[in-house]
Image (cartoon, helix red, strand yellow):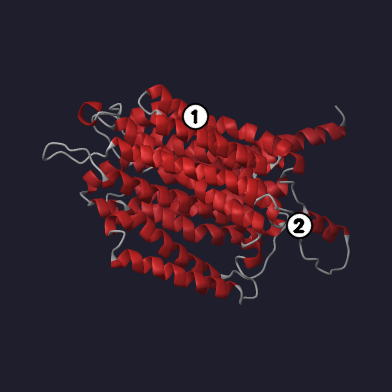
Amino acid sequence: MSHTQQAASSRSSGHTRIVLVLGLAAMVVSMMQTLVVPILGMIQSDLKASTASVSWVTTATLLSAAVFTPLLGRFGDQHGKKPTLVGVLVVMIAGSVLAATTTSLTWLIVGRVMQGAATAIFPLALSVLREEIEPEKLHGAMALVSGTLAFGSGLALVGAGLLTQGSHPDYHRPFWLAVVLAVVALVGVLITVPASRTKTGGRTDWLGALTLGALLVLLLLPISQGHEWGWTSGRTLGTFAGAVVMAGVWVFTENRVEEPMVDMKMFVHRPVLFTNLAGLLLGFAMFTQFIGVSYLVQMPEKLVGYGFGASVLAASVVYLLPTTLVSLVGAQFGGVLVRRLGARVTLAAGACFGVLGFTWLTAAHDTSASVISAGMLIGLAISFGYASMPALIVAGVPAHQTGIANGINSISRSVGSAVASAVITSLLASKSVPLPAGMPALPRESQFTLSFAIAGGAFVLVAVVALVGLKAAHAPRTPVVRKAVTPETTELASAGSETTPV
């Protein structure tokens, strides 16, 4: 083997390790979102908390992710991806250790806030890939890392179910799993990920971060707590109104500061705007499948006339794990389709699988085979969506805005998941089966049917976004900066203006 071939083989091997490490880090991120779903009842019982209080275990992570993801994504672009990645992972490990050792609901929520900051790892990982991976392999690498998000969400459900089995279940165990995986990811990042070759530098837009954080908190808080507060209560309507006001304040701020965290022109650029809309709809559909199927299969058929009476563990392993496995495998095919057909076509193809899967769930959810098969189609849809959206974002923004743009896309999916949680929970609670006094209310089957139909409608809208909204997508025009021409500046200019067909 010649020296050139050896060098090429070494670079390829190094890039493979980078992709695998970043995929592991992204998987840990997604696990934080669903890790507590199977153990919320256990936490409520052990800590003797109310339903409203324990719901903050999930809400706190969502709000933390909304605040820190865009800030840290931009910070990584400015000051280096690797140190930012390391810092975020250290914070997440500390939060996971706190959650795994505390017996206080307050400190558990603090730990979950620290875990939420880890959501910034995903856009940072994509920024690293854009900098390190050759253009011809970039889509496949992004698809693999993106595919681990859906896999991690399902793995967390399964892991939490397995770790809390037995005669003495302990809700702390799943958090220790998070600690172990995060430590492995941290070691991998320290050893494998190279230091950033390009940094934009500049000031951190703290005012923009503060106003965007306030906007997202005011928006997500009533979405996640509306079913507890009441959708027409003064608190819910007031926070929604506050979100509208803060949106205006944020836009005004970003248009006035010299170095804004979010370039408003980038934010409303057609590919970015419609990709974020697709992300919101995809997040809604994915979480609807997780919640809807999990609850449906646990319904006692003898009492309500439908369901399979599955345990929490069976719901995760038998009915949801196939979806996550298909998502992981499908991400590889999604990357191939993005390279050969384009991200827009791949997104539309995934949406069609999603429509088919939810149509199947809507029409026939009376057998385990139907529920599992439909879920696998939905998993394929999710993987294609996750594979295509980073490619659309990368094609729509200059290299130095990759982190913040993908951060906002991550938030759009989180908002979609929060909306799904609120909508589906409210739908299932709105109509219940008549049961003897003293028994907990259980939803009518029609409410599950309606939930699946709505999620199918969300995938129809994703197809419309892909085929119509993104049809006119084009590569961004990067402003030309007049500088002395040197080999170094020429290389940086080329890196900043590279585009990808969509």
Q: Is residue 366 visible?
A: yes
The quadrant where residue 384 appears: top right
Classify 212 as above or below 443. Answer: below
Q: Quadrant of the N terminus?
A: top right
Decide if residue 259 is on the left or right side of residue 54. right
Q: Specify the farthest residue to the bottom.
A: 256
Q: Relative to the observer, which residue lies in front, 422 or 43?
A: 422
* Residue 341 point in image, percent of width and height: 71, 37
Mark 2 lies on a secondary structure that is: helix
Q: Is 264 left, or right, of 63 in this rendering?
A: right
Please give the residue where the numbered disc 2 appears in the rendered image: 496
Q: 10 Å neighbourhood of mark 2: few (<14), some, or many (≥20)?
A: some
Percent across and percent down for residue 312 are 32, 32
Quadrant of the image occupied by residue 262: bottom right
Residue 44's disc is: none
Disc 1 secondary structure class: helix
- On screen, 98 above or below 19? below
Q: Which mark is residue 376?
A: 1
Going from the N terminus, do you reach mark 1 or mark 2 first? Answer: 1
Image coords of residue 388 (percent x, y): 63, 43
Classify mark 1: residues with Cα within 10 Å, few (<14), some (14-19) or many (20+): many
- Residue 174 visible in the current orientation: no
Task: Say which of marks 1 and 2 sits in front.
Answer: 1
Q: Is residue 247 left or right of residue 345?
A: left
The answer to whether 401 is drawn above or below residue 181 in the figure is below
- Number of numbered discs: 2
Residue closest to the eye, 130 or 315: 315
Residue at (32% x, 37% y) in the render: 446
Amino acid type at image mark 1: Met
Q: Where is residue 109 drawn, in percent x and y?
A: 34, 54
